[in-house]
Image (cartoon, rainbow, N blue to C red):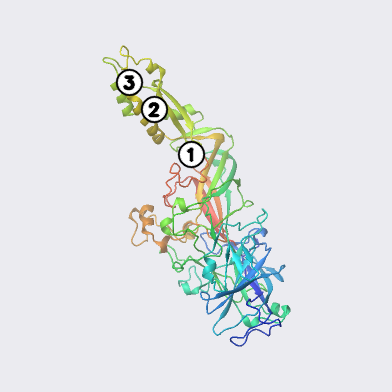
Amino acid sequence: MKKLSFLVLAVAGMLFAACSSDKDAAEGPQVPGEVIPDGYMALNIKLPTQPLMRAVNDNFDDGLADEYKVSDCALLLFQGADEAAAKLINAQAILLPFDAQVDDPDMDNITTSYLATAKVKGYEKTTGNKLFALAVLNYKNLISIEASGMPKIAGTTLTTSSTLADVRALTTNADLTSRSGAKNYFFMTNAVLSTAQGGAVGTAPAVADIFQLAEMDPTKIKETEAAAKADPAGDIMVERAVAKATLAVTATKVNGLDIKTTEWAIDNMEPTSYVAHNPGNLSYIGYKSDGSTNYRFVGNVTTKGTTSLGSDKDAYRTYWGIDPQYDADATGMVAATSFVPTGAANPLYCYENTFDVQRQSFKNTTRAIIKVTLNDGAEFWTVNGGNTRYTTVTDATSYVVDNIVNKTEVLDAFKAGLNAGKSWTVDASSFDITYERDAVTGQYKVKNLNLSSTVIAEIDPAKTFKSTFATDIATVLADAITSANQEVVVRDYQGGVMYFEARFKHFAGEGATDLAPWNTKAAWETPAPAGGSTSAAYPGYNAPFYLGRYGMVRNNWYDVDVTAFNNFGYPADPSGQVNNPDFDDPDTPDDDIQEYISAKIHVLSWAKRIQSWSF
């Protein structure tokens, strides 16, 4: 399979500044302070593949052709002593089609590379200043280039005082995958890269190794387009600004019952995204777990190309970043609204969702919802999450009746209500019980609990019960409704439909593929978590060990394979209910999961990550 590197290397000859002359440029600025009039610069723009397996960093897959289609492109140029200090010069659109396109071979970091040229206006070289470029592809949903030559990004017009930090701070809720409805317009911009290798190389990457702007060689501004194309000024690696997910179900049964159809959706998605990849303060870049040999936040496969448009410099992909709610409990998360068939042909996309270890919990984590319909499509019921399938509601609710009949408070109230010398056997016939299905949770609940007509007929000083009995027992019966619904949970699976959830793992994996292993047995962590439990491990907020176990990062492909269903799931769609404790405690740590399904999640080049789940 052809690997599409969704790191875009833009080698386009473009430098922008105020134009001071209409004459063609000489061969680039040679003297500090010299203003270069109009000239041409060529750039190589490289689209990265998506990591294939998320826990394993450098596993790549090109993905679909529409995911690397380019409809428009522009460059933002900066100049300064270094990346952090560089100020914006201006922006310029690159006319398409590109001058050249070369696809890279399978399993390499790059999907395809483009050669582009742009006209450069009046770049001024000053002592110690460098020239940098930020490429934006498929940008028109959120960026426009004003008459001044300044870019307007997500409603904010940048100025000549703007820096990369200003760009990184911009957020958007724009559609970053489509225009006019088709999923073929993926916004892309510069990836965050490292000059040092990560992985199992023995040396921790450092903050100083990380860069995002592509440095251009201003001496390669040429008088003609042809000359610029023959001598490109630099390379730009770009990446898609969204995460991708696919889900397959290889399981064929649920508790021995045949599956008819499976569908899925992404739920609890981030509502906004940073426009550019925002790596945060990078304090994590050299983290490595004592349970793994890998410096997991940087890959160890070079982005150096193997084709005629390939870069001659080694750089390595980074695999983390922050979202706008990174260090706060998530609010406004977006719920799934529809389901699509499972399988590789039906990918879904979302904004990246990352968080610190403290917030590695259900309410903050994006998840897949799997909808399963059993082959017979018949309604059935379960009791207290058990695997027994009750085909009549009477059988299932018999446990509710037993709970009520045997409550001490109920029996004591009946005893206290008897007239002198009378007796009564409390059983199902003593009550009139009605039920209703909770549309949100699918629980089949007691709605009303009243004395039966047989009992009411015996309320008389001359009969079995005291005249105040109905009033005296009213509070007891009301309390019995509440306790019965809590103690005996009957779930109603209408149409044989059920739902499962799988939270997206990033670095977490199985065995040797786990780049941030959760220390469940206190085998290596110092100090060891008491009992190896999540409650002991997570509140320690041990970022070097656990940061990034869960989450979704842009340009990563999370491929979920559900291999088994060992229990019945939810009887109602949990989409949008992540903070509803009737489903799960929203503060539950991500690693404290019930075994309801088995799945493997792969992330694709897209960087592809594979996860295995068993439900």
Q: Nearer the viewer, residue 109 or 438?
A: 438
Q: Which residue is mark 1?
A: 441
Report the amino acid beneath label 3: Phe
Q: Position of residue 526 (x, y in %)?
A: 34, 62
Residue 343 visible at all: yes
Task: For the residues labelled 2 and 1, say whether their Cβ atoms are less than 8 Å apart.
Answer: no
Query: Which residue occupies 58% across, 86% down?
Result: 32
Front residue of this view, candidates 86 and 215:
86
Residue 241 falls left or right of residue 230: left
* Residue marked by disc 2: 402
What residue is disc 3 on? Answer: 469
| Sequence-earlier tag: 2 or 1 | 2
Judge whether residue 109 can be spotted in this image: no
**Where in the figure is residue 150, as x and y percent of width and height?**
61, 70
How crowded pointer 2 is (Cα within 10 Å; few <14, some 14-19, many 20+) is rated as some
Task: Specify which label sits upstream in the sequence, 1 or 3.
Answer: 1
Amino acid at dot 2: Asp
Q: Eyeballing the image, is 53 above or below 133?
A: above
| Three-letter amino acid code at the position of disc 1 | Thr
